[in-house]
Image (cartoon, helix red, strand yellow):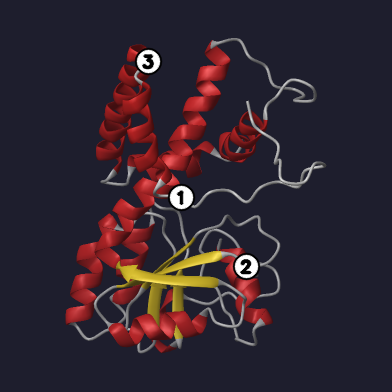
């Protein structure tokens, strides 16, 4: 993610320097960490495990400019940011809702988290302005539960789909002639997640303090749907389905050869 953001910031006209003891990124000056003290903005983009320690190293320099991270789990950072806010430092936190492989930031989603310094939150929004991003904001303390219920849920359902298909002996090499629209959509969701690096997928689950509650909720909901199906109770099924439908807008009908009759999924 650091490489992607460095190139995007440079393209936006910012002078970008990088501190990375492990490697150099061609085309960017390599600078000591102490340079962060005088920077207009410092973006901490390291592994999820390393983020708290590196963030504390940066904040110990009492930087005069904005400091933020791009980690996908914020829980371990809450006390660090609380201390920094009390010390009068300009801190915020962001979560790019996309991976480092995207070709452009145009149209991508970005969450900006308020770490208790509203001016810094506004500065973070301005830092990412001009890239065509869709930006939303929330309190830092609300981030992890939101991510568990959305990104974490999508990851878990994809992992479950893949392992279930494997145990059932299903090998999906080609869907032509075999797959419904809904199964194709499931594969479109699951395949990128199943094929991304495990050391990216696992920490999003394992380090998010809201993940255990999500597992419990999934188990409860699965048991509820199973009971409805086993009872073949249409009225109760329709009632629960109505609550499920209420969270999502209906899909736009696909173009059909016969006007007024969109294709049905089976």
Residue 153 location in percent, x, y? 41, 41
Circle 1 residue: 248
- Give whichever of 27, 117 is nearer the camera: 117
Dot 2: few (<14), some (14–19), or many (≥20) neighbours within 10 Å?
few
Q: Mark 1, mark 3: which one is toward the viewer? A: 3
Q: Image point 30% across, 41% down: which residue?
A: 211
Residue shown at the point (31%, 47%) measured from the top left: 208
Quick one: quadrant of the N terminus?
bottom right
Residue of label 3: 232
Q: Residues within 10 Å of mark 3 (few under 14, many from 20)?
A: few
Q: CA distance from mark 3 to mark 2?
A: 43 Å
Q: Earlier in the sequence, mark 3 or mark 2?
A: 2
Is residue 56 placed above or below 258 in the rendered structure? below
Return the x and y of residue 65 as percentages of the image width and height: 39, 87
Check disc 2 and report its element: helix, strand or loop.
loop
Quadrant in the rendering for residue 94:
bottom left
Residue 146 sits above or below residue 160 on the image: below
User: On the image, numbered disc 2 is attached to which residue?
Assistant: 107
Give me the C-alpha separation between circle 1 and circle 3: 25 Å
Corner quadrant of residue 134? bottom right
């Amino acid at each position: 993610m650091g490489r992607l953001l460095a190139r995007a910031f440079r393209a936006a006209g910012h002078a970008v320097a990088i501190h990375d003891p492990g490697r150099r990124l061609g085309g960017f000056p390599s600078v000591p960490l102490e340079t962060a003290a005088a920077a207009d903005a410092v973006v901490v983009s390291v592994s999820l495990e390393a983020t708290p320690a590196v963030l504390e190293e940066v904040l110990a320099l009492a930087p005069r400019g904005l400091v933020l991270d791009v980690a996908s789990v914020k829980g371990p950072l809450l006390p660090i940011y609380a201390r920094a806010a009390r010390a009068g430092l300009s801190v915020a936190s962001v979560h790019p809702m996309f991976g480092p492989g995207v070709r452009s930031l145009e149209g991508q989603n970005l969450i900006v988290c308020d770490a208790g310094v509203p001016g810094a939150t506004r500065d973070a929004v301005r830092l990412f302005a001009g890239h065509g991003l869709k930006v939303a904001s929330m309190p830092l303390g609300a981030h992890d539960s939101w991510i568990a219920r959305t990104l974490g849920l999508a990851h878990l359902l994809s992992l479950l789909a893949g392992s279930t298909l494997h145990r059932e002996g299903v090998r999906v090499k080609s869907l032509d002639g075999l797959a419904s629209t809904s199964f194709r959509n499931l594969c479109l969701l699951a395949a990128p997640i199943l094929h991304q690096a495990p050391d990216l997928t696992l920490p999003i689950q394992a380090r998010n303090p809201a993940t255990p509650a999500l597992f419990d909720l999934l188990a409860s909901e699965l048991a509820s749907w199973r009971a409805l199906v086993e009872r073949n109770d249409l009225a109760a099924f329709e009632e629960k389905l109505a609550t499920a439908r209420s969270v999502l807008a209906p899909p736009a009908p696909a173009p059909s050869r016969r006007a007024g009759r969109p294709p049905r999924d089976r």
